[in-house]
Image (spheres, coloured by chain):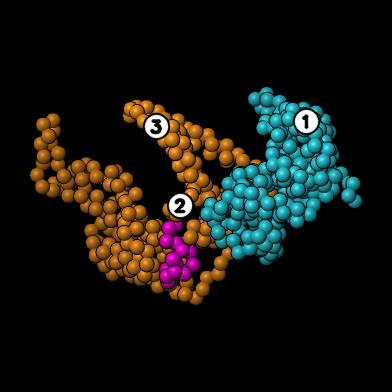
Chain colours: A cyan, B orange
Amino acid sequence: MTSQTVIRIEKLSFSYPDGTRALQDVSLDILCHQKVALIGPNGAGKSTLLLHFNGIFSCNGSVEVLGMKLEKKNLHAIRQKVGLVFQNPDDQLFCPTVFDDVAFGARNLGLAEDLVARRVRESLESVGLAGFEQHSAFHLSFGEKKRVSIATVLAMDSEILIFDEPTSNLDPRGKREITQLLRRIDGTQIIVTHDLGLVENLCDRVVVLSKGQKVADGTVREILSNQALLEAHGLV
Amino acid sequence: MRHSFLDKYSGLDSPIHRLDPRTKILSLFCLILICVSTPAQAYLAFLAYFIFLAAAIVVSRVPLGYILRRSLIIIPFVLMVAIFIPFLKPNGTAGSSYSLGIGSLRVYTSGLIVLWNVLAKSCIAVLSVILLSSTTPFPKLLRGFEQLRVPKIFIMLASFAYRYVFVLVDEMERMKRARDSRCYGGKWLWHSKVIGQMIGTLFLRSYQRAERVYVAMVSRGFQGRTISLGRSRLALADYLVTAAAVSLLIALRIILP
C-alpha cells in the first residue's frame, strides 16, 4: 500500500503564454503517504508545478493523479482528492465568515448541510480554532488565517494535500505549530517551502527544482547534507 | 489592521439587532417604497416616516452621531445633483429674479418643491439603509437577502466586495506608508502623478488577486454553481414586527394628507 504511486508526472514541460519556460521535462512519482518537500530558489517553477497537481494548468496528458489522467472529464474528481493550500491566506479565504470558507469545498462536494457543519467543526478543532466559525477571516491574525486555510482543505477530506509555503511569514512559534499540525495530518503531502527546518522536521523526501528542472531527488538526509548542491541552487 | 466600516455597531444587542435580517429588510424596504410613492406636499406623512425611523434608531441604540455622519457620505451627492432643480422648473416664481449681468436667475416654486421632494426621500432612504447595515452583521444581511430570493450572483458579488474591501484598504495603506517613508513630497502635479500610479498598481494587484482567488475556488471544487450560505428560521416576533411595521406604514400613507 505504501509504495503505491499517487501522482505520476512524466516529462512535463510548461511555458507561460508570454513564452517564459517554467518547467522542462520534469518527471516525478509521489508515493502514497509520503511527505515530500519541494524546494528550490525563487522562480524555479515550484508554484507552477504545484498548479499542475490538480489541473489548474492544463498539460499534455503527462500527469496522472490516483490513476486518473489529468483531463477535463477527470478534473472534478481530481480536485476532490487533491487539496491545495495557497501561500497567501487572503487568496484562500474569500467568504464573509470562517464557517463559510471552511464549508466552501465541502458544499461543492454536494454534502448535506449537517454533514458540512460537522466537517467544519472537526476541521477547525484539528487546527486548534474551535469556536471561530462566525469570525470574519479579515479579523484573524496571520497565523490563524494560515490555520483556517489548512482547515478549508481538511474539510474536503482530500487524500493528497499540497501546501505552498505553509510557514512563510510566521513567527517561530507559529512555524512550530504548523509543523506539528502537518505532522498530525495523515495522507500524502507535498510541501513547497524555503524553510529547511520544516523539511527536516516533517518530510521524508526532498525534491530540488531549479530553473524549471528537477536537479535532485532523495531522502532528507541526503539532500540537506549535500552542502554543494544547496549552495549551487541558492538554498543556504 | 482592523477596520470596522460598513457594519460597525452591528455587534450591539438591542431588540432591533435581534430581529431576523429579513424582517428588517422587508420593513425598511416597505418604508422606502411608501416614502417614494408619497406626493411631495404631504409634509405630515414625511414627518411620520421620519419619526418612525427615528424611533427605530433610538431603540437600536446605535449612536445618532454615527448615523448622521454616515449619511453625510451620500447626502452631498444628492444635493449636488438636485441643487439646480429650483432654477430649471419654469413654473411659479419664488422671490424675485437675480440679475447676473449676462442673464437673470430665477428660483421657481415648483422647482423648490421638487428639491424638497428629492432631499426628503433620499434622506429617509439613506437613513433606512444605514440603520439596516448598522444593526445587522454583513454576513447575516447577505443571508437575509439570499433567503428573500435575491439572485445569487448579486449575493456573491456583495460578499466578495465585503471580504476584499478590507484587504484593498490595507494594501492602499501599506503603499501610502511605503511612499511616505521615502520622503514623499513636492509639487501638487507630482502628487497627482504618484497617486495615479498607485491607483493603477492597486488595480493590477486586485486583478491578479482575483485570478488567485479564482484558482483557490476552483481547487476546492468550484464549478460555477453558487452555494447558499445556510438558513435561519423566522421567530413569531419577526412575523409580528414585519406585519406591524408594514401595516403601520401603509396606514400612515393613507391617513396623512
Work out whether disc 2 and disc 3 sit on a shared chain. yes
Assess whether residue B13 is covered by the magenta stretch: yes
Residue B218 location (% of width, % of height)? 67, 45
The CA distance from mark 1 to mark 3 is 44 Å
Dot 2: chain letter: B
Q: Nearer the viewer, residue A199 or B223?
A: A199
Residue matched to label 3: B184
Q: Which percent across, then down, holds residue B129?
A: 39, 57
| Range of magenta residues | B7-22
Q: Which residue is farthest top? A: A19
Q: Nearer the viewer, mark 2 or mark 3?
A: 3
Question: At 57% across and 37% down in the image, what residue appears?
Answer: B208
Callout 2 crowding tier (Cα within 10 Å): few <14, some 14–19, many ≥20:
some
Question: To which quarter of the image does residue A223 belong?
Answer: top right
| Quarter of the rendering containing residue B96 | top left
Q: How many marks?
A: 3
Mark 2 is on which residue type? His
Q: Residues within 10 Å of mark 1 (few under 14, many from 20)?
A: some
Using the numbered discs, state the Cα–Cα distance from disc 2 to disc 3 in whole angstroms. 25 Å
Instruction: From the image, tell me which residue sits under label 1.
Output: A229
Image quarter where the C terminus of chain B lies is bottom left
A205 within the magenta span: no
Residue at (61% x, 48% y) in the render? A171
When the figure is inspected, residue A45 is found, relative to residue B239, above or below; the finding is above
Q: Earlier in the sequence, mark 2 or mark 3?
A: 2
